[in-house]
Amino acid sequence: MINIIKIASPYIDDTEIDAVAKVLRSGNLSQGKITKSFEDKFAKYCNIKYAVAVNSGTAALHSALNALGINAQDEVITSPLTFVATANAVLMQGAKVEFCDIDEETFNIDPGKVTEKITKNTKAIIPVDLYGHMYDVPKINSIAKKNNLKVIEDAAQAVGSEYKGRRAGSVADVSCFSLYATKNLTSGAGGIITTNNKKVAETIKLFRNHGQEDGKLYYYKGLGYNYTMSNIIASIAKKQLERLDRLIATRRRNAHILTKYLKNIKGLTTPKESSFYKDSYHQYTIRILKEYKITRKKFMEYLEKHNIQTRIYYPKPLHLYPHFQKLGYKKGDFPVAEALSQEIVSLPVHPLVSKDEINYIVKTIRSIV
Ligand SMILES: *Cc1c(COP(=O)(O)O)cnc(C)c1O
């Protein structure tokens, strides 16, 4: 009897457990020295000047939008095929979400469709590094530059991914990461923002702590939230960061085995790693097309029966949910995102999936007739 191969599983051992115990014994639980030390190490990892930790990826996005001065009347362009937090953060600032359709190979915002979405109220683009594949950096950045827009990279799924040797978190105006339980680098919950802009970093530091500067309690400089990251959480994140390169290498090994043995199956597409890109494979997402032997639903049931968990990220594009339909969106607006949401399915690829298990997944899929 084989164990269930889960779609996600955090890699935690005594290293993290000991680090947490140490913080608990120290008595200094809230945001403090360990948070700062994690920020410094994360900035170094991304090769960028500033990193500011917060308590979720959602808080990271919200803080970034606020620090860039995005408010009511402003418009922000983003992908409809993403976790809801990407677009909700825009709504939190009272701004308008302008969805733009995606490219069917990269699952990222289609640069060819961005320009037509730009109006005089557009202030920023949030490209999403979906599944750990970074956005079209040269094209999106150049459209942004030409139109005087900011790029906020939703890198929640892309820690350690690279474009031309530059890591996610170092190519946009501001980048936002999540440390949620299923993410490549996890502390259970958490987020971190990277930027080379000192003013943005400082604004976020105030915003995350009710407008208070570090060490200057009760001098509220403006509206803020309680988005601080505790020493407890930071101690886990710091240890995860030390092993991140190995975790990503294992994901990439697993992904490459899957691609090698699944790429020539009719009606099943494997993810493409574009040239100049190094993907961290937060998810390994295939597409089940009409030409495939069975439907996606049957495919998922078959794998489930063989103890292999699969998931759909995401089953419905955001513009089809009530709080975005209220903005006037309807079915048919983003045909690529809508079609893809019916074809995609992700397979287990995380570092706790052994080589034997990966081979078992290959064998199981190849046995479908
Ligand atoms: C996980 C995720 C977020 C939100 O992060 P949380 O830490 O869960 O708040 C935002 N965007 C994307 C693309 C994500 O995958």
Image (cartoon, rainbow, N blue to C red):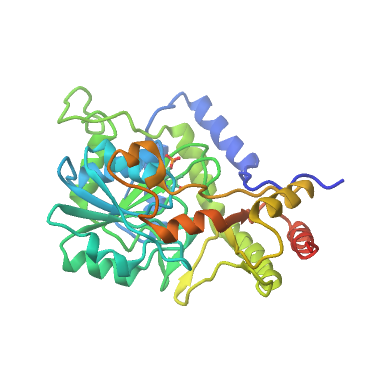
Q: Residue 109: where, in percent of width, then height?
A: 37, 61
Q: Residue at x 15, y 30 (%)?
A: 221
* Residue 148 as seen in the image, left or right of residue 340: left
The quarter of the image that holds ligand 1 is: top left
* Residue 95 as seen in the image, left or right of residue 42: left
Q: Residue 13: where, in percent of width, then height?
A: 65, 42
* Residue 215 as seen in the image, left or right of residue 278: left
Residue found at the very far right of the displayed protein: 1
Q: Residue 180: where, in percent of width, then height?
A: 49, 41
For residue 219, above or below residue 62: above
Q: Considering depth in this image, is 8 or 346 the residue closer to the camera?
A: 346
Q: Residue at x 44, y 33 (%)?
A: 231
**Numbered marks: total:** 0
Q: Quadrant of the C terminus?
A: bottom right
Residue 168 lies in quadrant: bottom left
Q: Residue at x 12, y 56 (%)?
A: 120
Residue found at the very far left of the displayed protein: 120
